[in-house]
Image (tube, rainbow, N blue to C red):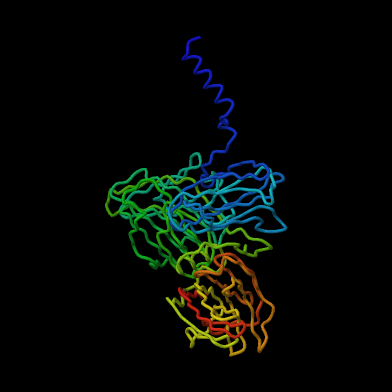
């Protein structure tokens, strides 16, 4: 046996002994809308990766298939933990869900599956766009019974693909499934391939379609533009006229188009990227549909193949109760408000009512010193966020924060953070603060930290640096807001409160 053959045999033996076979490890690519499986031992975890674009809305669902109590974590390209969930519906379910997370920047993300308190076992994992309930991920089927809106549109179905073809001068036609369920809040997506085109084309997606004369319409043109319209009783109203977007490349023949309907807010997506949004409360529910339009010209023709139809709806608990997010990704005020709407923490039809760059308040006395914001306006339901910096001098404790729903000097709710890292949310009634949310985190003693209060009817929830701290029930349903400095003993406290924003509905 020569030396070359001996070396090859030695290398093969080394590989067999020390290199893990490929089939023993899961493929770490996590495709959208496809279920993957894995298994972990005690104390272990498994990582899966995917790429996503800024503003893409992603849901992750991990379901145990035996004894595993799964924990799902979303980790950024830099290794920062963005979101994590153990039991989304404890104690009813051990499954872990991150619903409708808004991707903060384009890049590669890691999904880590681990076991709570060292639990082990098998699991299945799915990544969705939009919401976390996979209402439909099997594309088009022959049972859909898609019907054309006129005799000009030709429809054919073959192996999960729906083909639309039309010809004529600026003619259009729509295909709607006669057996589809009417939906209110949902995400829909379809793959588009342009098969034929003479002169130009427009591809349409209907949203909340109630009839042939009532629907919202999201349209993409061959010129790289998109438009949002409403057809109400046969009358077309432009909600957003033809607009370009960097994600939409003119003449692109293959792409995904998606739409998210959430309350009165409709958002349009192209290959996962958000291209724009509109708000309108005319149509609250309906079915989905698709359309095709030719350009102006007697010999104009167009044909398109539609595939990979997906519909996701909000995953809820307790007969329609929304999942309370355990963590939020910290973003700029506008993006933060949209992200909260995606996660169903606030309604999608809110409006940014306040955005203050910076405010300062100081107190030298024991108690709460308040400085009103928008003093002539009262607010009821809202999300109110602020970055808090506390500078306290003296032997006593001092804190800074916000007051809200104030109807007089001695009735309001206070959210605060002090210089020792303690935080709280409580209602003041006369000289007494009622039992509320209180906690402490030593990591909150330096620099600025974010307080976020979501006030919805009688329930007020507190988040500190994006982590859920708890909620209270209050009889105060509306009132003024402002900044506050708090001294628990004789002290001097200087408060710097920046990026104050309020999203109201």
Q: Where is residue 177 shown, x and y percent of the image?
A: 52, 52
Q: Residue lying furthest top in this view?
A: 1
333 relative position to 83: left or right: left
**Image point (43%, 66%), residue name:** 278
Estimate the x, y position of residue 443 in percent, counting from the top left: 57, 65
- 437 or 491, which is in the foreground? 491
Can residue 134 be seen here? The reply is no
Residue at 54 percent of width and 55 percent of height: 81
Asked whether 166 or 423 is in front, the reply is: 423
Please give left or right for residue 436 compared with residue 481 in the image. right
Percent across and percent down for residue 449 are: 52, 69
Q: Is residue 29 above or below residue 395?
A: above
User: Residue 367's spot in the image, x, y percent?
Assistant: 60, 86
Q: Residue at x 34, y 44 (%)?
A: 196
**Front-most of 466 and 55?**
466
Q: Is residue 111 visible?
A: yes
Depth order, front residue of 114/349: 114
Q: How many marks?
A: 0
Examine the rendered structure and indicate whether residue 366 appears above or below residue 317: below
Residue at the front extreme of this rendering:
395
């Amino acid at each position: 046996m020569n030396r070359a053959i001996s070396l090859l045999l030695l290398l093969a033996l080394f590989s067999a002994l020390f290199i893990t076979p490929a089939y023993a490890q899961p493929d770490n690519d996590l495709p959208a809308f496809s279920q993957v499986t894995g298994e972990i031992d005690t104390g272990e975890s498994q990582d899966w990766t995917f790429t996503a674009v800024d503003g893409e809305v992603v849901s992750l669902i991990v379901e145990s298939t035996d004894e595993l109590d799964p924990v799902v974590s979303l980790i950024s390209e830099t290794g920062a933990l963005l979101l994590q969930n153990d039991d989304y519906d404890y104690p009813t379910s051990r499954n872990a869900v991150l619903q409708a997370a808004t991707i903060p920047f384009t890049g590669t993300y890691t999904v880590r599956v681990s076991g709570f308190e060292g639990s082990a076992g098998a699991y299945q994992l799915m990544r969705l766009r939009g919401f976390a309930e996979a209402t439909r991920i099997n594309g088009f089927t022959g049972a859909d019974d898609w019907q054309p809106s006129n005799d000009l549109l030709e429809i054919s179905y073959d192996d999960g693909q729906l083909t639309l073809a039309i010809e004529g001068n600026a003619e259009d036609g729509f295909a709607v499934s006669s057996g589809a369920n009417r939906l209110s809040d949902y995400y829909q997506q379809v793959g588009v391939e342009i098969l034929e085109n003479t002169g130009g084309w427009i591809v349409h997606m209907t949203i909340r379609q109630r009839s042939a004369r009532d629907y919202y319409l999201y349209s993409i043109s061959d010129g790289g533009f998109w438009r949002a319209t409403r057809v109400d009783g046969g009358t077309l109203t432009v909600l957003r006229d033809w607009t370009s977007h960097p994600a939409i490349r003119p003449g692109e023949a293959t792409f995904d188009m998606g739409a998210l309907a959430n309350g009165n807010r409709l958002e349009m997506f192209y290959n996962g990227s958000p291209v724009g949004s509109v708000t309108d409360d005319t149509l609250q529910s309906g079915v989905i549909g698709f359309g095709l339009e030719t350009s102006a010209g007697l010999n104009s023709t167009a044909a398109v193949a539609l595939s990979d139809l997906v519909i996701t709806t909000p995953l809820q608990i307790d007969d329609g109760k929304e999942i309370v997010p355990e963590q939020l990704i910290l973003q700029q005020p506008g993006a933060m408000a949209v992200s909260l709407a995606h996660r169903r923490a606030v309604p999608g039809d809110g409006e940014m009512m306040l955005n203050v760059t910076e405010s300062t308040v100081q107190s030298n006395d024991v108690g709460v010193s308040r400085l009103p914001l928008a003093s002539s306006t009262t607010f009821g339901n809202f999300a109110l966020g602020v970055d808090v910096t506390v500078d306290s001098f003296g032997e006593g404790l001092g804190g800074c924060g916000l007051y809200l729903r104030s109807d007089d000097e001695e009735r309001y709710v206070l959210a605060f953070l002090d210089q020792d890292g303690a935080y709280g949310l409580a209602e003041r009634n006369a000289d007494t603060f009622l039992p509320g949310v209180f906690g402490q985190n030593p990591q909150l003693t330096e620099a600025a930290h974010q307080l976020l209060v979501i006030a919805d009817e009688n329930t007020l929830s507190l988040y500190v640096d994006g982590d859920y701290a708890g909620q209270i029930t209050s009889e105060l349903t509306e009132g003024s807001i402002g900044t506050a400095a708090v001294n628990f003993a004789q002290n001097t406290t200087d408060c710097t409160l920046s990026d104050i924003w309020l999203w109201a509905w």
